[in-house]
Image: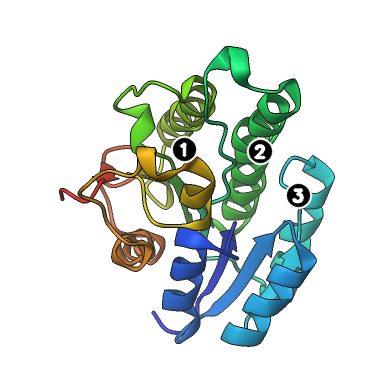
Amino acid sequence: MAGRSFVVVGGTSGLGLAVARALAAEHRVAVLGDVATEVAAVRGELGCDGGVCDVASYAEVRDSFGWFAERYGTIHGVADCASVWAGGDLLDLAPERIRRAVEVNVLGTTYVCREALRQFHRQGFGNLVYVGAMAVVKARPGIPVYRATKSYGASLVESLAEAQHSNRVKVMQLHPGPMPTRLQERVGAEFLDTVYAMPDQVAPEVVRLLQLSPDHVYVSGEVVLRADGRW
């Protein structure tokens, strides 16, 4: 399994960074983030590749995947960890915040899935892991827009998994609960459960899914893993 190539979207902080760290010791890793200084910092820390990409822009997602595919030849797995928080009562949310959540959590997820699957179909295999949220499973007050946008991602991934007709191209998802991350800092302590998992505790499960072999069957679309600290 050594020497494989992986792309971690949203790999500059939180769970995405933990996944990139776990992979970088043995594999070629490329991280995508929307802040140039953060991408540069992760590249320096991990010795990996990276690129600045706003996933809300299809052209940027397409060009980033094209560059990595040309550099690596094969992309064995893609972890989609990019997410924008939009907490608060709908009446209190600024339209700009609502729009950005939809751009990243809905359009961005769609664009990443599209380009990942395009590459996997070219090469005949590959693993796509979408990082959702426990909010999809359990409604909570104060997060209607965030939950709705993450529910879109879960629905998309379920449909895409069914559409592949082959376990050689695997589409999977994992739904973490609240974790002490930069996103959680923006959320506020009231949304952090008393029992929770740390990013480096959830990352190994994402890495395990990314590294499943093409011949590993009964995985794509069959298993939705939930990690909320209660395992």
Q: Secondary structure at mark 2?
A: helix
Neighbourhood count class around disc 2 (C-alpha, 10 Å): few under 14, some 14–19, many 20 upward = many
Q: Characterize the local packing of mark 1: few (<14), some (14-19) or many (20 or more) Cα atoms within 10 angstroms.
A: some
Q: Residue furthest top?
A: 91
**Residue 146 in view in this figure:** yes
Q: Please give the residue where the numbered disc 3 appears in the rendered image.
A: 54
Q: Quadrant of residue 39 in the image?
A: bottom right
Out of 28 and 121, give the one closest to the viewer.
Answer: 28
Locate residue 201, reporting x and y percent.
Answer: 29, 65
Which residue does the image show at 57% across and 84% down from the upper left? 46
Give the CA separation, mark 2 to mark 1.
24 Å
Q: From the viewer's perspective, is 125 left or right of 113? A: left
* Residue depicted at x 50% and y 22%: 148
Nearer-N-terminus badge (2/3) = 3
Query: Please, is residue 53 above or below residue 106 in the view?
Result: below
Q: Which mark is residue 104?
A: 2
Question: Looking at the image, which is closer to me, 208 or 190?
Answer: 190
> CB atoms at circles 1 and 3 under 8 Å apart?
no
Q: What's the amino acid at mark 2?
A: Val
Height in image: 200 above or below 178?
Answer: below
* Residue indicated by mark 1: 164
For the residue marked with disc 1, what is the amino acid? Gln
The quadrant the N terminus occupies is bottom left
Count of numbered circles in the view: 3
**Circle 3: is it few (<14), some (14-19), or many (20+) Cα within 10 Å?**
many
Q: Cβ–Cβ below 8 Å for labels 2 and 1? A: no
Image location (x, y in percent) of residue 215: 32, 59
Q: Residue at x 69, y 69 (%)?
A: 38
